[in-house]
Image (cartoon, coloured by chain):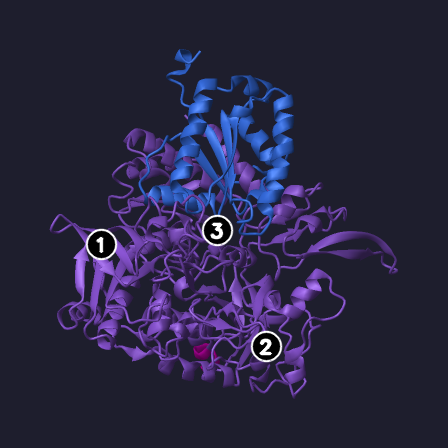
Chain colours: A purple, B blue
Amino acid sequence: MSRIGVFVCHCGENIGRTVDCAAVAEALKDHPGVAVAEDYKYMCSDPGQALVKKAIEENNLTGVVIAACSPHMHEKTFRRAVDQAGLNKFMCEMANIREHCSWIHEDKDEATAKAIDIARTIVEKVKHNRPLEVIKIPVTKRALVIGGGIAGIQAALDIADGGHEVVLIEKSASIGGHMSQLSETFPTLDCSQCILTPRMVEAYQHPNIKLHTWSEVEKVDGYIGNFEVTIRKKARSVDEDLCNGCGDCQGVCPSKKIPSEFDAGLSNRTAIYVPFPQAVPNIPVLDRPNCSLFKGRAKGLKKDACGKCKEACLKGAIDYDTEDTFVTEEVGAIVVATGFKLYDIGRDQPEGLTGYGEYGYGEVPDVIDGLQFERLASASGPTAGAILRPSDGTEPKTVVFVHCVGSRDPEKGMSYCSKICCMYNAKHAMLYKHKVHDGRAVAFYMDIRAAGKGYDEFSRRAIEEDHAEYIRGRVSRIFRDGDKVKVWGFDTLSGEQVVIDADMVVLATAVRPQDGVKELGQKLSVSVDADGFINEAHPKLRPVETNTAGVFVAGACQSPRDIPDAVAMASATGAKVLGLFSSDELEREPAVAIVNEQTCIGCMRCELVCPYGAIEQREVCTVDGHVCGHTAYVNPGVCQGCGTCQAVCLSKSVELQTFTDEQIFSEINALCAWE
Amino acid sequence: MTDAHTDFEPRITAFVCNWCTYTGADLAGTSRLHMASNVRLIRLPCTGRIDPLFIVKAFERGADGVIVSGCHPADCHYTSGNYHARRRFAVFHDIMEFIGVDPRRMTFSWVSASEGAKWKDVVNEAVANVRELGPYEAYRALAPEAVELEPSGHSGAEVAS
């Protein structure tokens, strides 16, 4: 005989406003199997939980139903309370009368009736709940960090310093990410490379960090504490152990006109290349699609068209016949730090967006984006830090900076704010004025968003000390006019049109997630939002976790982030991973499938549909050892509890604990109580 | 036809997965999106867990319509459960139609955790469709008489039958 307690929460006014909680409790009192039903203002509060515990003890309850918010909100809270009162915590379930009832309905009678239905349905389920024990699983104390930008480097260093091995993978030839391309950083104007490169080297030399560059995630199996990750090491054509980074191969390469990714297209590189002199590791890669030897092979030439780099390499490190190789790493936690890319307006249009052809980007050579300006201003850039415009190499005397290109524009671009542009535009204006004293810096802005320590002071300095002219308004057109770049804009404060004959224009284009994040998300079972950024588990309370346990997120792949944010997030993931690694075993909910070997016919349909390979066939033997049949067996460490096996089982022999047929049919049956 | 059902409040049972649609419905609540109150949710870990008999049972026990909703293709929390659900539902849907169940009584949709507004639309649309079709008495007439709720916690025998 079930003795179930039903506890109806008012959630302050949140439920109480549209649901008559006392009436719900009253109605449930008469429900078969319910021993006690009470309502209370805040069931999750200390006195609320005490009320539940007291009722369990006094009434010797066999099950508990909390009619309150979503189980995603407080199931853990109440199960803990139930456990403390001595009842198995899996005998407690939540009836969601807030998100699924009081918040979405206005009519009090309707909402109350529905709340009663919901509570009854869950009472019927709880009647069939069984006491379960948590499953303990071992933890592999190694971490994988995906992405070698500042966020990935920081996360890797924090975990490695905590004493655990880290596998750091980076898809390009060097770690460093976007930060290595920056000139100076806001709000301190310290040199980006000066603070980054020591960390790159530290990560490379750290005894606990294993680095795979020119590599990508191919496949992820397993679950928290026990992931098995297959890494594709793309064919580099250069032996990483033999190469000593002398650079002779680059010197002889005849393909010299390939736009350099590192210089954002403002300079050229060779086909065999190290992305930048401070690259870590300082080992080149051969860009096969741009190499004349491989172009020749692709055309079917019998004899190789080139081979100069191989000839030049004294160490014999170059091999044109290497292929992609696969490495399998076992890890217990994964940090995703794949970063961002800039909205390449006019060239790479996200679906459904019309773009910004009127800004002439890609057509007018002196219209550049923020990253290109960084390269111009950088001492390691193509102009060695001199601000010279790309078209003719002269010093621009008037530079226009346009904020919010593609950001905060739901009509044509992204609806979100890219967060970093207000600050880097102020920085660009300052850097320009520091280098071209008689120059004129004009910025068109929507609003100046300078929230952050020292940020507002910094952007004010650009205006007040460096005399950047800030015009509140938008730019309608940018086009070539002789050797000038004409900018048509509108000053919304004075209400006047503004026309500027500029020498160069810098567009602050929107920050977008890096290519391939969605596909990576699918491999990790992590979802992305409408803009393609990785979804965190909770926007406020679990900002660096994802919905897949053991997978964490850091930096600009989650939303536009500046360096301090990205580093803080990365250290937060480090803390989370170290926390996970602090015990030898993890506790898991026993929401796993079990097979009834008495009735299983061994058809193995369940094995076919299991996404995790958790099911295997086992032999059934007679007493004298002859195999007389087969049954399925579910490995509880691998099972994730989807229940797909149960739905296909012909003999109803496999059962997902916590969602059994009995429980679900009882819920369905309870629905006939609808009035 | 429509006039006859103006007082009729359809009873709809929704079978939803825990990770996408249930969470999407939570988001609809958090966003205070008001919608019809005719739908009752049954939370499952994954749409792959849905046995077609759940739907048969729901009709038998008084539902005028059902909704099945889970993660979008390729977004399944369990990698592929929703594909199994889709295949199973495609076949089941045809069988139901063959035996005379109006397909408008069965809604299949993908609602992700970020689609609270879509969930509202799915609910309102399903309610409007079923409202137009009227109560599903014809189906219930075929089913054995409704069984009273069990007085105790032991309804397993009846359930399994």
Q: Which mark identifies residue A446?
A: 1
Q: Residue at x 64, y 45 (%)?
A: A646
Q: Chain of mark 1?
A: A
- Residue under pointer 3: A91
Mark 3 touches mark 1? (CB < 8 Å): no
Q: Which mark identifies residue A7?
A: none
Q: Which element type, helix, strand or loop, lies under badge 1? A: loop
In space, the residues marked 2 and 3 are separated at their CA atoms by 70 Å
Tally of numbered tags:
3
State whether residue B139 is above or below residue A83: above
State whether residue A38 is above or below residue A524: above
Q: Nearer the viewer, residue A243 or A126?
A: A243
Q: Is residue A259 left or right of residue A564?
A: right
Q: Chain of mark 2?
A: A
Do the residues at discs 2 and 1 belong to one chain? yes
Q: Nearer the viewer, residue B118 or A381?
A: A381
Q: Which element type, helix, strand or loop, lies under badge 2? A: loop
Q: Whole-percent x and y of residue A20?
A: 28, 36
Q: Earlier in the sequence, mark 2 or mark 1?
A: 2
- Residue under pointer 2: A253
Q: Is residue A158 magenta?
A: yes
Q: Which residues are magenta?
A: A157-162
